[in-house]
Image (tube, grey):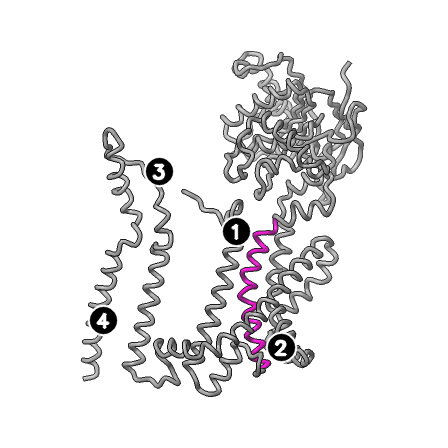
Amino acid sequence: MPTPVITLRQVSKVYTNGTVALQDMNMTIQEGEFVSLVGPSGCGKSTVLRLIAGLGNMTTGSIEWGQTLTENHKLAFVFQEPALMPWATVMDNVRLPLKLAGEPKHKADQDVLESLQLVGLRGFERSFPRELSGGMRMRVSIARALVTKPQVLLMDEPFGALDEITRSKLNSDVLELWQEKRWTVVFVTHNIYEAVYLSNRVVVMAARPGRVVADIPIDAPYPRSEEFRTSMLYNTYCREVSARLQEAMYGVDHHPPTFAAGRSR
Amino acid sequence: MMFDRFTSILTGWQDWLGSLLGLAERLPLHLPDWALPQLAATAGEKLRPQPTETRDPVLLPPAPRMSKWLNWDVVAPIVVGILFLVGWEVAVRLTGIPHYLLPGPILVGQTLVQEWGTLFPSLLITLQITVVAFFCATVSGLLISILFTQSKWIERSFFPYAVILQTMPIVSIAPLIIIWLRNNTFAAMVVCAWIVAFFPILSNTTLGLNSVDHNLLNLFQLYKANRWQTLIYLRLPSAMPYFMGGLRISGGLSLIGAVVAEFVAGTGGQRAGIAYQILISSFNLQVPRMFAALIMVTGLGILIFVSMSALSDKVLGQWHESATRREN
């Protein structure tokens, strides 16, 4: 029997300028699930994540947390940008959440090193962010999220700004870690292929107003090797998610959009 | 007649200049960049089994550290400076302009040496005013900008007055301050210099404290950082480059403020600053002495700027773009 960890009930978010970012969103995320939110830009997928994280207030509705979560260190957030402090070393950047929680330095250092080990950044403790590549900075950002041993990991298009090779490497690394640690992951992306490869559930969202249009379970066994990326099953799922996304954007009997035709909305 | 003499001098000059420049080119002060490939090639031929014609510039060794101070960035302005001084001296001698209008650099130099005993103590007094005012400006600017960022309302209410304080010409309020603080001239001058130096630090640091990466701010919020932690670990380090920029501007400005205050106060006696010496020299038409004092003030200004730049590089060296060297 799966235990719900996060339950969104009728969550709406209206910005002060009148934009309806989210309307009556319902979603349940089970413990240990890897859920991806996919949708066009402006569909409110990042807003959902921020609301779950407690950054900003929802207009109506509620978010319930499961009983299995402890109050401290229950969630961590990975932003699209690495969001590292440029004046601090890798070590100090990763230690930040523990420092803010008032943990003594010698005690925190053990966790920091462990976390850096997980993302494969041992040996870079004393480097500054500017000395690292984009992919490595993202790894530091992930290490910082993992250092508090979170039960829920929220990731907001974390690999969106990276090149394809770095992205697929980080994808498989994150997946491996997830299988080992079994966090609950909510992953926002606009990349269908990434979503299908990683998740055991893909939630498709539509814009204006932001809402859920499809909830597609990806029934493929883990661990997922690189071969999975070229398998029949993978392609079938990608096609389905893509079709639902197209529906969400242009209607059920959609015609491919042309720039010349001047489509009316 | 006159014209002929001039042209002959000019052509003579040209030759001399040409030989000087030629000499400068030949001096082995610093190997220019284009010379490096040859050097690397000759060094590399002994090591490499087969010398290749196409050499990758990326693989070249960096220039030796010894030549750091002997590069053209240093030499070129010095050459220009020397040429200017020589030109000045020659022009003064040729035109026979009286030294109470324009003294030659040699005379100025002599005066500087002769008058060092009276001018240098005055310079130290000006330096004292400058340093105290600069210190006050730094501390007050920093504290007030922190106060501003703690509450939007405080910033809204008080920032316009900081602007007003800044826009009032210092020359016009200096007499007032000197009257108010007539029992303590030193304090009056410090206040004048402080008013000039304070604003760049305040406005720069306020800008810096508010220009925090919003993702980092969210991160701090997520980990339930309190106000104090956010200030110490996030806002202040983020503002550091801006604060340093403010220091660089204010260092020079506090000297200007001190000089202006001395001019307005016009006090002599034991505690006369360098600006007062300039003023007195101008009354007595001791123009060479004016120049000597001017050189000292300028030197002090440069010293302040250089030390602030060095401090800035030291503080920001490891992380900020402005202080790091890129090898492109």
Name the main secondary structure of what is drawn in magenta.
Answer: helix
**Mark positioned earlier in the residue sequence (3 or 2):** 3
Seen at 81% across and 24% down, the residue is A67
Whether labels 4 and 1 share one chain: yes
At label 3, the amino acid type is Val
Q: Which residues are magenta?
A: B238-266
**Mark positioned earlier in the residue sequence (3 or 4):** 4
| The C terminus of chain A - image quarter | top right
Residue wearing tag 1: B314
Seen at 61% across and 51% down, the residue is B239
In this view, B200 is above or below A103: below
For the residues labelled 2 and 4, the Cα–Cα distance comes to 49 Å
For residue B174, which numbered disc appears in the image? 2
| The N terminus of chain A - image quarter | top right
Q: Which secondary structure lies at badge 4?
A: helix
In this view, B37 is above or below A140: below
Residue wearing tag 3: B58
Whether labels 1 and 3 share one chain: yes
At label 2, the amino acid type is Ala
For residue B114, which numbered disc appears in the image? none
Are the residues at dot 4 and dot 1 in contact (C-beta closer than 8 Å)?
no
Q: Is residue B223 something that shows in the picture?
A: yes
Nearest the viewer among A199 and A137 is: A137
For the residues labelled 4 and 1, the Cα–Cα distance comes to 45 Å
Q: Percent position (x, y) of residue A97?
A: 68, 36
**Mark positioned earlier in the residue sequence (2 or 4):** 4
Of tags 2 and 1, the one toward the viewer is 1
Q: Which secondary structure lies at badge 3?
A: helix
At label 1, the amino acid type is Lys
Label 1 resides on the chain identified as B
